[in-house]
Amino acid sequence: MGDFVLAGNLNFLSLGDILQLLGSNASSGVLRITSRYAQDLGLIYFHNGNPVNASVGSLAGLDAVNSLFGWLDGEFEFIEEKVDGENVIKKSRMQIILDCLRMLDDGQIEQLGPVTFTKKLFYPSDSLSNRPIIRGPLIDYTYVVDEEEVRAGNKVVAEGKHGGWLWVILEGTAEIIRETPRGPLKLLRIGEGAFIGSIASFLLLEGSVRSAAITAVNNVLLGVLDLRRLSADFLRMSNQFRSLLISLDKRLKQVTNMAVDIHLNNIKVEELINGKAQVFTQGENVESLFTITEGEAHVARNTENGYVPLANLYQGDFFGHVPFLDIGQEPYSASVFGSKDLKISEMDPDILKQEYNQFSSTFKNFIEHLANCILVTSMLACEFGKNTGRNV
Amino acid sequence: MAIVKLKKREIECKIVYYGPGRSGKTTNMEYIYKTYKKQVVGEMVSVDTEGDRTLFFDFLPMGLGQIKGFDIRLQVYTVPGQVQYRSTRKLVLKGVDGVIFVADSLTVRREKNMLSLKDLQHNLKEYGISILKIPFVMQHNKRDLAEQGVPVMSIEQMERDLNRQLKVPSFSASAITGDGVGATLKECLKLTLLSLKKQIKSG
């Protein structure tokens, strides 16, 4: 096999772009695509710039190309070589590209990435089947010590019960449900690679109360994670990083509480943000990161229906831009309001980033999953804000 | 920005037909495809999207001349305006060199025209293109319907509605008979090539 002549990330150059590029270059060879969200390798064969065959998993030909268009995150490399064999794909290049993009936008092709949207974003309200499924990257089995099966409809964890186990979903889908005075509220759906349990499991003194119930939608296979090993990883981190993680964990609980409160219509954003100074304005391009040493701050997203509260932050919490995480809140997607007595100290994101890069893949996946849950729950809170018709 | 293909000594430009659904973008393209069939390279690609169609073909118009010894190859597209077709729009509008806006003369479509134009501005902006700077031509389509007694807007009104700020060249057309279709495309090509020459010089 020859060396690759073109390589990169699908985030930057989408498959549609690559197909056009190879097409206008009349290239022959093999395009290899890998994604950490997929177990299989994707291959597309080109002859004179036209895709002639493809494969991914059990799919071949055009079906494989269609499915590969859903890989929004991944790496590709093109190896120039002579491609022999039958032209399985007869459709023209442009027809493939335009057809696939249409199917992608119509929700006929499954999107592969950290968050999978079955169709459009939360549409229409309340029907859970349209909620996105949060998945994680491929599982690192070295941290899995045992497997457990939970049958469809059974609870993985019950809300309010104590428990410190951490799991990763190996197969199947589960939903996260909160009890409310108006009955159970379904919040998120999680799938393969998603984690169950929180940072609290590492904090032996605090004991951990499950903040929501998790129920298996279909038969779910869970991997029990090596808690001792993960705790050891956690204890080796710098104090600064540990407090960042604890604050991130609190942030998820905060945004979940806010979403539930918005759904129940018993929260007033004015009381939270009025009279407070805006520290960050939504959309601002800031790269700094702060911890609160005194006072409090509030995170709120400005939407068509006014501000939607997303989190209350207190002493020890962080806010700002975390270079390796996207939690879908400040600074880009939300504003931060500070109380009069707010005092902050700046953190060095570069040092944190260096430390993050050295973590085990399981821990990185765990942190990334936490961030994705915050991101999706923030969107959910805004969606609830729209549905309850509150003009905040 | 057009793609310069050194191997084939061609410059590839992208022309996009934009406009509200059923304003006649497809009819425009079908007419061009039929009329210039000999110069068209490959098939016309058609994809059905909800309420509209996306079309694409590739052609080498004759008599356009060359830029610095390179032939001009055109890629002509229509783009679905509906919000959900984000990926298609992104692919089509990326690196677009010239835009033809096909406005519907029917009185009942007045608002649809304006919304579509606004939508175009927004979409172009998302890809870093200013609607005021890109080579742009306006077409007032379906003029023939006036003869059949269907209420259509006057050219003056359409110009006021759509072209007051843009002040771009505009053409009356009946894409169904082919009237004005060639003239619209030619003007757009002229503007696109002028702009390309300018870009190549200043670059």
Image (cartoon, rainbow, N blue to C red):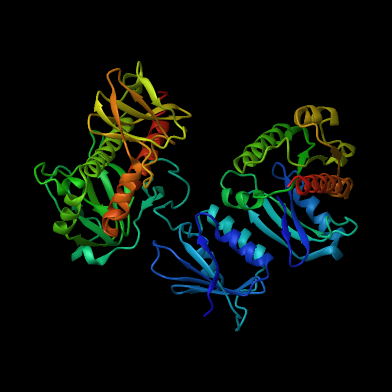
Q: Which of A269/A103 is in front?
A: A269
Residue A148 visible to the viewer? no
Please name the residue shown 59% across and 78% down the image: A81
Residue B185: percent from the left, percent from the top? 83, 48
Residue B125 visible to the viewer? yes
Q: Which of A336/B198 is in front?
A: B198
Q: Answer above or below: position of A350 versus A8.
A: above
Dividing the picture into quadrants, the one containing residue A149 is: bottom left
Q: Which of B1/B102 is in front?
A: B1
Question: Residue A208 vs residue B70: left or right?
Answer: left
Which quadrant holds the C terminus of chain A?
Answer: top left
In this rendering, the count of numbered labels is: 0
Most extreme residue toward the left, as rendered? A205
Most extreme residue toward the top, as rendered? A275
Dividing the picture into quadrants, the one containing residue A193 is: bottom left
Q: Answer above or below: position of A235 versus B121.
A: below
Please name the residue shown 35% across and 24% down the image: A337
Residue B154: percent from the left, percent from the top? 84, 30
Q: Answer above or below: position of B13 versus A41.
A: above
Question: Residue A338 vs residue B137: left or right?
Answer: left
Please name the residue shown 88% across and 60% down the image: B62
Question: Residue B41 vs residue B120: left or right?
Answer: right
Dividing the picture into quadrants, the one containing residue A358 is: bottom left
Residue B103: percent from the left, percent from the top? 77, 39
